[in-house]
Image: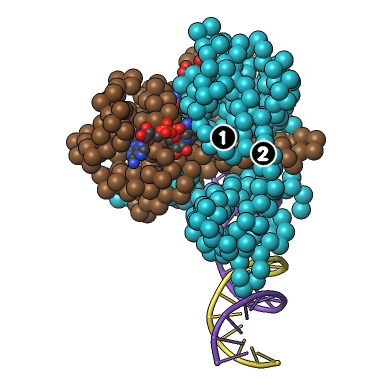
Chain colours: A brown, B cyan, C purple, D yellow
Amino acid sequence: MSRRDISEFTIRRLSLYLRSLRELREAGTEVVSSRQLADGSGTTPAQVRKDLSLFGSFGKRGRGYQVRELLETLESILGLDRQWRVALVGAGKIGRALLGYADLERRGFRVAAAFDTDPEKIGTSHYGVTVRALEELEETLRAEQVEMGIIATPPAAAQDTATRLVEAGVTGILNFAPVKVDVPPEVTLRGVDVVLELEGLSFALTSDVAGGSRREPGSAAGG
Amino acid sequence: MSRRDISEFTIRRLSLYLRSLRELREAGTEVVSSRQLADGSGTTPAQVRKDLSLFGSFGKRGRGYQVRELLETLESILGLDRQWRVALVGAGKIGRALLGYADLERRGFRVAAAFDTDPEKIGTSHYGVTVRALEELEETLRAEQVEMGIIATPPAAAQDTATRLVEAGVTGILNFAPVKVDVPPEVTLRGVDVVLELEGLSFALTSDVAGGSRREPGSAAGG
DNA sequence: GTCGGCTTGTGAAAGGATTCACAAATCAAG
DNA sequence: CTTGATTTGTGAATCCTTTCACAAGCCGAC
Ligand SMILES: NC(=O)c1ccc[n+]([C@@H]2O[C@H](COP(=O)([O-])OP(=O)(O)OC[C@H]3O[C@@H](n4cnc5c(N)ncnc54)[C@H](O)[C@@H]3O)[C@@H](O)[C@H]2O)c1
Ligand SMILES: NC(=O)c1ccc[n+]([C@@H]2O[C@H](COP(=O)([O-])OP(=O)(O)OC[C@H]3O[C@@H](n4cnc5c(N)ncnc54)[C@H](O)[C@@H]3O)[C@@H](O)[C@H]2O)c1
């Protein structure tokens, strides 16, 4: 069972367990059962145990899991026991909202640089990050050892942005633009599309002549 | 095959096909094959045909699908042949970015009202929407016949917000707060969690000693 | 120390989703 | 009209995920 064989579904759920575990740690809880983790992340106890068992045995039978220990284990599995340096391309409305999103830094994702093409925006600072000219992208990313990029440009610029990010050494990209973006196979790409999510709600509400929730496979809804 | 039996995976892909079809329409293309749709949305031709076949027969063998016709069919299936009225709760950084997101209106989602608790924000207008006091939520939503809600409050307020939205008649909710939110079974809930997506990238980049892309099941990456 | 109640870890079974593969249909060329 | 190149629609097969169910292990009570 190599890390490569772990499914996307499992990884999403590990993040959800982590979210629960952080809350439990804040609350001072020391031990947690698979049932509690399942309740806190919208899945089943068997699923929790199966997910964890892919990586090892972390619990005690009859007792459960140590919150602090499991939390550190999951952080380590997900590669969160370090800081990631992230570049943001596109300092528009969503880009600036992300610059002000303190959870990124708190969870280990430091926005090390931001870029835009708009002369009005270049040179301005937002939440401690100064917006640079797009031309400086490659140089800056190599100097700052950035490994992840966030695309927050208009859709028309998304593919070019992705290509340049990859060219500059980035191997993980989060894309907010609602267009298909191609990257080489060694680069990991995830997309967030707000309209697509709303369209999913539209379908559900249209189907429901009289209501009905729909399962969201692989990850609990509610995140 | 009732609409209720259609999987979340299929629905996400239908949205992606729609995205491709809109581009094709702009480009003036009249006919499209399952292969082209697959290429444009990161899936396979067989998957496209299987997805569409769940709802009917829309193509011509040996030829393909009429772009305009299929586009209208998919919009109708997804319930997008109407306008949806949406309420936004939390007019902070991400909330205001969403108010300025013109694609929402363009795709049929009108933000009919926005709410906040901060006296400094109440009464201000953003992109044509005036922020109201949270107290006015129930009354306004009923008056405006709002059916969907977007939660953009701090995590601590998310569950209360969801409860109030449901109480006010909303049956579809999009949650941006990184916490689990419970709603009654007749309400559909989707969550967007940026940190969770980045954590997924973190895992992929950590696994890859020497690169390797990872499949995103159910929907093509790149959105 | 052992009994009873719990909870994990995990093979096996069940349930879904995707891919395969091919008959049926369309169309253009001759 | 026939042939050949396409492309759809779909049952069957494959692949993957989730759920089941239970032996093994832990803990506190007595
Ligand atoms: N506003 C939202 O709430 C929201 C939500 C989800 C997704 N999105 C998507 O995010 C993207 C940005 O949306 P927005 O609302 O922030 O738009 P915006 O117009 O406010 O911002 C886009 C920014 O990108 C800059 N830009 C343009 N071309 C560029 C390039 N080649 N390189 C770098 N920067 C470039 C522009 O100067 C501008 O500052 C769009 O693709 C949009 O669909 C927006
Ligand atoms: N900033 C981002 O880019 C970003 C991205 C993804 C998710 N999020 C999430 O979105 C939520 C909002 O983030 P933000 O960065 O916009 O924070 P923010 O602090 O800028 O905005 C939150 C807003 O909610 C208001 N609010 C507080 N309690 C409320 C209540 N009970 N009802 C209505 N409004 C209330 C506040 O007055 C404030 O205006 C958070 O849960 C955050 O984790 C933010």
> x and y percent of residue A71 in the render?
44, 27
Single out the mark in the foreground, 2 or 1. 1
Which mark is on residue A51?
none
The answer for which chain carries disc 2 is: A
- The answer to whether residue B203 is visible is no
The answer for which chain carries disc 1 is: B
Distance, label 2 to label 1, CA atoms, is 13 Å
| Residue at mark 2 | A202
Find residue A81 and report its image quarter: top left
> x and y percent of residue B86 in the render?
64, 28
> x and y percent of residue B46 in the render?
59, 63
Q: Nearer the viewer, residue A22 or B184?
A: B184
| Residue at mark 1 | B104
Q: Secondary structure at mark 2?
A: helix
Ligand 1 has an atom within 8 Å of the beta carbon of the residue at disc 2: no
On screen, A74 above or below A27?
below
